[in-house]
Amino acid sequence: MRIQTAELLQSAGRADQFPRGGRPEVAFAGRSNVGKSSLINRLLARRSLARTSSTPGRTRTLNFYTINDAFLFVDLPGYGYAKVSRSIQEEWWTLVEGYLAERAPLRGVVHLADARHPLTELDLGLREFLASVGVPCLQVLTKADKVPRGQRAAVLATAREALRVGDRETPLFFSAVTGEGVPELWRAVEAMLGAPSPRPAGSAIGAAPQRRGVPNE
Ligand SMILES: Nc1nc2c(ncn2[C@@H]2O[C@H](COP(=O)(O)OP(=O)(O)OP(=O)(O)O)[C@@H](O)[C@H]2O)c(=O)[nH]1
Ligand SMILES: [Mg+2]
């Protein structure tokens, strides 16, 4: 993918701030500090378009980026950061759930988990939620530069077992540091963007979001 333009369209802290328009979009979800903003920057070959930080819980809004005036990337607030108050976490989660369940242009979600750690209940809960609202999801294992090649097969096997996907799904190793996984992820993202909307025809509303536990530990 040749990136001609990539710009922040909107930072939304409320659903009525989500941008309108029919361009398809892919969202990036995962725990706080897992590397969502870094992955977006790496994919777009922009050093600091999406704000990254060593302080977890930095991305507090849904940040919509327009790429080539053709499609959108959405950087979602991370979940599971214990130092953010429960009520704030609950507020973000309600907003994110509503977005995932009802956003008409959403074609798929790239779900990030740290390749060095097992998937958590929150990660699995998000995957389940996406399945329940019919949104395609691609599993990415971030910070792959920290996982020696010799450990890759074991990491993959553990992730597949946690996800209960057997051989049907292969999580993708990705590194924002080395660029590993960039071409593979672009292929998957392009396929999502090119696929028909998973939402019911003529409706902006998918299944109603189910309440889940507060995304905290
Ligand atoms: N080694 C390594 N570090 C990474 C990688 N991706 C991100 N990081 C580091 O992880 C930290 C968090 O990265 P972010 O991209 O800000 O993570 P985020 O998921 O957007 O975080 P929140 O917005 O707080 O939810 C930063 O210190 C990054 O430099 C990677 O692929 N390899
Ligand atoms: Mg971020």
Image: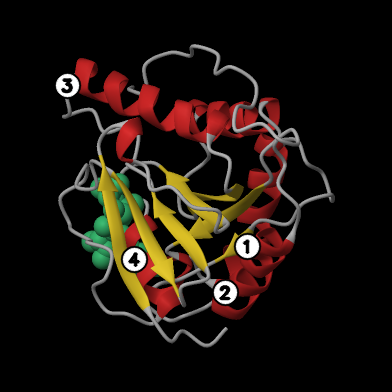
Cα–Cα gap, marks 1 and 4? 16 Å
Residue indicated by mark 1: 172
Indicate the position of residue 75 as horizontal and vertical percent values. 37, 52
> In the image, what residue type sits under mark 3?
Ser
> In the image, what residue type sits under mark 4?
Ser
> In the image, what residue type sits under mark 1?
Leu
Determine if the C-beta at disc 4 is less than 8 A from ligand 1. Answer: yes
In the image, what residue occupies the spot 60% across and 27% down? Answer: 205
Earlier residue among tags 3 and 1: 3
Cα–Cα gap, marks 3 and 1? 32 Å
**Disc 1: CA contacts within 10 A as few (<14), some (14-19) or many (>=20):** many
In this rendering, position of residue 179 left or right of residue 22: left
Indicate the position of residue 141 as horizontal and vertical percent values. 53, 57
Earlier residue among tags 4 and 3: 4
**In this view of the protein, can residue 19 be seen by the observer?**
yes
Cα–Cα gap, marks 4 and 3? 24 Å
**Disc 2: CA contacts within 10 A as few (<14), some (14-19) or many (>=20):** some
Task: State yes or no: discs 1 and 2 in contact (Cβ < 8 Å).
Answer: yes
Q: Nearer the viewer, mark 1 or mark 4?
A: 4
